[in-house]
Image: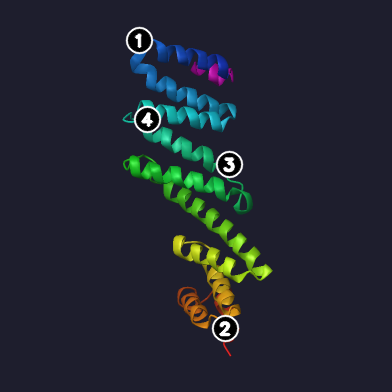
Amino acid sequence: ADELVSKKEYEEARKLLLEIKNRESAREYAPLAQLKIADSYLKEGDPDLAIIEYRRFLELYPESTYAPYAQYSIAMAYFRRIEGAERGAGTAQKALEEFLKLEKMYPRHPYGDVLPLRIQKCRNIIAEGELLIGKFYYKKGSYKAAIGRFEGIVKNYPDFKNLDETLYLLADSYKKLNMLENAKIYLNMLKERFPESQFAKKAEGIKFQ
């Protein structure tokens, strides 16, 4: 089966792997066969079917030593499909959920070096998507709708790479609604946390008179 996969004869490989799974005499190899079926779909370029098979593996063999790999593979199948903030926020959310599931279900997983970076990228993409929507409302003059998005970012993604811009737009949105106390709160937060930011300098131009 491995040889067939290496030759890209995926369907034939899966027939053999299914045979292994169904043989009483090969029970000890059944988990690995199921995992290789999932892997074969990934190699064939069908991540949706791969995810289904990885989930099937986790349902059948949740205590397997290969379970963290299966869960990580599900997350990575989504992660590789992230296209950027404009179109990829939904996929990034799915990837993030699967990465967090890995952390929760298998805390002794072997992905400690890369997982925090993957999670941070997902969080940044999601927050960036929210920022784009917020800016759309801001430019239209729909400041209440914009504030909802910006405040969501501040609350849920405090480590967002563009938090300084978010705080500036949030403060200015409140200013435009004449909610000056709220505006001052976020301006102060911006100046305290990002004193060297271009947006902190830009914020000095916001007048309250």
Against 59, residue 126 (above or below) is below
Residue 169 is at least partly visible in this image: yes
Q: How far apart are marks 4 and 2 (CA)?
A: 55 Å
- The amino acid on which the numbered mark 2 sits, given as a three-letter code, is Glu
Cα separation between marks 2 and 1: 74 Å
Badges 4 and 1: C-beta atoms under 8 Å apart? no
Q: Is residue 103 left or right of residue 88?
A: left
Magenta-colored span: 1-9
How far apart in space, not on screen, are marks 4 and 3 (Cα)?
23 Å
Up-down: is 121 above or below 169? above
Q: Nearer the viewer, residue 135 or 162?
A: 135
Instruction: Find out whether the residues at labels 4 and 2 contact each other: C-beta distance under 8 Å.
Output: no
* Sequence-first tag of 2 and 3: 3
Residue 186 or residue 138, whichever sits in front: 138
Name the residue that disc number 2 marks.
Answer: 204
Q: Do the residues labelled 1 and 3 touch (CB within 8 Å)?
A: no
On the image, numbered disc 1 is attached to which residue? 24
Q: How crowded is mark 1: few (under 14 residues within 10 Å), some or many (20 or more)?
A: few
Tell me the element at label 3. loop
**Numbered mark located on residue 81 in the image:** 3
The answer to whether marks 2 and 3 mark residues whose Cβ atoms lie closer than 8 Å is no
Q: Distance between the residues labelled 2 and 3?
A: 40 Å
Residue drawn at x 37%, y 30% as measured from the top left: 66
Under mark 4, the amino acid is: Tyr
> In the image, residue 154 lies at what x, y percent?
48, 66
- The residue wearing badge 4 is 66
Report the amino acid beneath label 3.
Arg
Quarter occupied by residue 197: bottom right
Answer with left or right where residue 184 lies relative to residue 100.
Answer: right
Relative to 53, say whether 175 is above or below: below
Furthest residue toward bottom: 209
